[in-house]
Image: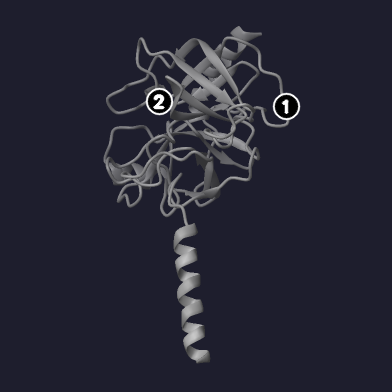
Amino acid sequence: MALLQLLLLISLLSQIGHCAYVNMGIVNGTEVKAHSRPYMVSVQKDKMHICGGFLVSENLVMTAAHCWNPGTKLTVVLGAHNLKKDRSAFTRTEVKLYHIHPMYDSENLLGDIMLLQLNKTIKKTKHISWISIPKKQNQDVKAKQVCSIAGWGRQSDNSRTSDRLMEVDVTVMDTNACEKKWGEPFSVSSVVCTSRPGGFCEGDSGGPLVCKNTAVGIVSFYQDGKCKTPQLPYVYTKISKYLPWINCILGQME
């Protein structure tokens, strides 16, 4: 009798665990502690999340250039954790100007960086702030170091985007090894790469790769149709490569 009760209990616990598990969000990630990443931004079209982004100053959001098409009107949501439940708490702001890097190549996503100039100045709050970016041009992002990414994107190619902000640790790869695997014409000085198990998927584009509290990369692209189990590395735009252009835009804001 005791054995039967034990078996029933084990069965019940396994059913509870199965029902409670929600498979969504960034690849192999977990839910972020609410508002622990106050720089994170949801870039939206028609009030629907399409990309991530992050505040780098009081009126500029950095994201991926491929998140915007000419003629598209984007808004950004600041201070959010759960995009469906926090609507009264977060701030929605319109984009005044779209600054796309002049060398952006939409075919192979080289120069995949964009600055969204907001139509108002953002004040720091408990839930909203900006993150540091590298100060030195072409600053090295060391291989084998553990960094992190976050986003509201899909957990796999066939899942839906997440309502809640998710995060995962990722390990930086040697860029030469990354270029060799992809066999693509990108310059090793313009990207950062990471490998599985942690990764990103559709809807995470534009979010930051964060190493030691500094945004060093922008989520750019992964192997098409294989965000959960890619044979090729995840690729990010290397922010320090574009510092002269970034500083030029920032200087115009002063």
Position in image of residue 227 (x %, y %): 34, 45
Name the residue rendered at 62%, 9% in the picture.
253
Q: In the figure, residue 86 lies in which quadrant?
A: top right
Left or right relative to 136: residue 53: left
Q: Position of residue 8 (x, y in %)?
A: 47, 79
Q: Are marks 1 and 2 in contact (CB under 8 Å)?
A: no
151 in relation to 11, above or below: above
At numbered mark 2, what does the secondary structure look like: helix, strand or loop?
Answer: loop
| Of callouts 1 and 2, the N-terminal one | 2
As drawn, which residue projects farthest toward the bottom? 1
Counting other residues with Cα less than 10 Å from the Cα at mark 1, is it few (<14), some (14-19), or many (20 or more)? few
Q: Which mark is residue 112?
A: 2
The quarter of the displayed image where residue 39 is located: top right
Dot 2: within a 10 Å radius of its alpha carbon, few (fewer than 14), some, or many (20 or more) residues?
many
Q: Which residue is mark 1?
A: 125
Which label sits on residue 91? Answer: none
Q: Residue at x 43, y 17 (%)?
A: 101
Q: Which amino acid, mark 2?
A: Asp
- Relative to 68, 78 lies left or right: right
For the C terminus, the image quarter is top right
* Type of the residue with mark 1: Thr
The residue depicted at 27 percent of the width and 25 percent of the height is 107
Q: Which one is closest to the eye, mark 1 or mark 2? A: 1
The percent coordinates of residue 143 (x first, y second) are 49, 48
- Relative to 121, is 127 above or below? below
Q: Nearer the viewer, residue 230 or 28?
A: 28
Q: Compare residues 63 and 211 and report the one nearer the observer.
A: 63
Q: Residue furthest front?
A: 1
Q: Residue 35's spot in the image, x, y percent?
A: 65, 37
